[in-house]
Image (cartoon, rainbow, N blue to C red):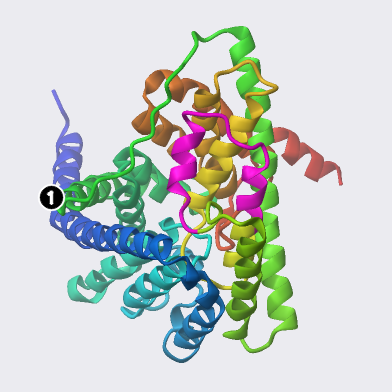
């Protein structure tokens, strides 16, 4: 027989879930619709740019325009993802609605004129800022608002990549290293799946990545995955530190903020003309797909690394994750020359593992691998994600991400001995 206390607890749980259902559905609808608009607009921008490559010559003035736009209309939301994370950690003020149109426009301009950027940052910002519209409407307290913002993060991530499981876990894993916020698990899952369904309902098709060859799991395979994961983690750490270093440098040397993306635009344009190809700008989806199917130049990952650091480090808008997919998949493709695993599998492993290290989200990244590539490839990718997470250090692409616990007890012991 159940006690009265146990029955009461189940009813409170049921009431809470019922209460969050319409809230999460609303968050998912808003985030999924925003992601659909984003994906459609970026496809349009990419098609226009590739048909009129001379637009790359206008990247610098486009960067200046975005800089001026944020200086005079968006100074309160310029921190982007870090503002979202800070508000989730310590709720202070409702995120201004202007974040959504500004980041959508800024990202579109970046891609139209040839910046090397992604889209996850945009999806997170639109998902969370739109979700925050419900804070005052529903008179949510700080605890509920925190869960609401996490749901917006999950819905945005899930809908922009078509990976609801990964998106749901990303929202509860990304905020702090060493801590997962299980109090938000149900709302994040609900919002992530609704967001993904809504994006698909708008007729948006996500890119399909296929790992064509997966060997049986073996001791050699595990050791190879560990080695690859360590390399991916070191690369992720270098990427995060490079973006932060460039950002700090340009802020220190260029006091007028709108001039930073102007200078960055000149650098990217000159570099694009120098290499004679546009494969290192924009999202780079064709090259990512090619990394799963053919042998690519071993330097592709390094070129994309530099183009992305120059773009995002100087203040262009977008995200880091799709460029990380590019860097990881092409690096994995290159590692097939020295590791006894198929190039397609290593590309898939790198695709998610560098993201795991740079964002410090090994669980979400492993789930993404399983959603995109299947369980067998996901097992190898999971090993690489964990190793990448460990070897990437405590730095990451999100400055507002907190360190709740060290990644490994060996690191804690080392700190105590100092």
Q: Is residue 184 above or below residue 227?
A: below
Q: Position of residue 78 (x, y in %)?
A: 49, 77
> For the magenta stretch, what is the residue range?
282-306
Count of number-bearing discs: 1
What residue is drawn where x is 20% and y is 38%?
5
Direction from residue 243 to residue 24 in the image, left or right: left
Q: 217 or 290, which is in the foreground?
A: 290
Residue indicated by mark 1 = 18
Residue 262 location (% of width, % of height): 59, 80
Residue 201 in magenta stretch: no
Percent of width and height locating residue 412: 73, 40
**Residue 354, image x, y percentages:** 57, 41
Instruction: Judge whether 282 appears above or below 76 on screen.
Output: above
> 398 or 138, which is in the foreground?
398
Image quadrant assignment for residue 46: bottom left
Q: Relative to 377, does residue 29 appear above or below in the rendering? A: below
């Amino acid at each position: 027989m159940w006690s009265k206390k146990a029955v009461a607890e189940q009813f409170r749980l049921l009431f809470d879930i019922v209460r969050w259902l319409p809230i999460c559905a609303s968050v998912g609808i808003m985030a999924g619709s925003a992601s659909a608009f984003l994906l459609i607009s970026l496809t349009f921008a990419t098609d226009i740019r590739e048909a009129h490559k001379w637009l790359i010559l206008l990247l610098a003035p486009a960067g200046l325009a975005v800089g001026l736009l944020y200086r005079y209309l968006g100074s309160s939301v310029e921190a982007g993802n870090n503002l979202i994370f800070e508000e989730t950690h310590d709720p202070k003020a409702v995120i201004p609605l202007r974040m959504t149109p500004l980041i959508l426009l800024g990202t579109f301009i970046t891609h139209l004129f040839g910046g090397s950027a992604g889209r996850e940052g945009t999806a997170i910002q639109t998902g969370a800022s739109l979700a925050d519209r419900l804070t005052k409407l529903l008179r949510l307290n700080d605890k509920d608002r925190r869960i609401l913002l996490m749901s917006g993060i999950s819905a945005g991530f899930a809908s922009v990549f078509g990976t609801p499981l990964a998106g749901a876990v990303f929202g509860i894993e990304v905020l702090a290293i060493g801590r997962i916020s299980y109090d938000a698990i149900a709302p994040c899952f609900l919002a992530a799946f609704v967001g993904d369904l809504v994006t698909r309902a708008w007729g948006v098709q996500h890119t399909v990545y296929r790992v064509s060859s997966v060997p049986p799991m073996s001791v050699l395979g595990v050791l190879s995955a560990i080695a690859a994961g360590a390399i991916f983690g070191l690369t992720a750490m270098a990427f995060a530190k490079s973006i932060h270093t460039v950002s700090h440098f340009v802020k220190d040397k260029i006091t007028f903020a709108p001039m930073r993306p102007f200078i960055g635009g000149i650098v990217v344009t000159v570099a694009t003309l120098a290499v004679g190809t546009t494969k290192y700008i924009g999202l780079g989806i064709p090259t990512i797909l090619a990394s799963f199917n053919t042998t690519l130049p071993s330097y592709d990952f390094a070129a994309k690394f530099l183009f992305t650091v120059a773009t995002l480090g100087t203040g262009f808008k977008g995200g880091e994750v799709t460029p990380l997919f590019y860097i990881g998949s092409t690096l994995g493709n290159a590692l097939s020359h020295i590791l006894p695993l198929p190039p397609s599998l290593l590309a898939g492993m790198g695709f998610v593992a560098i993201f795991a290290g740079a964002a410090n989200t090994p669980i979400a990244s492993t789930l993404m691998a399983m959603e995109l590539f299947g369980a067998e490839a996901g097992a190898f990718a999971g090993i690489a994600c964990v190793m990448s997470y460990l070897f990437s250090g405590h730095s990451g692409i999100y400055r507002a991400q907190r360190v709740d616990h060290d990644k490994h007890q060996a690191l804690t012991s080392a700190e105590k001995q100092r």
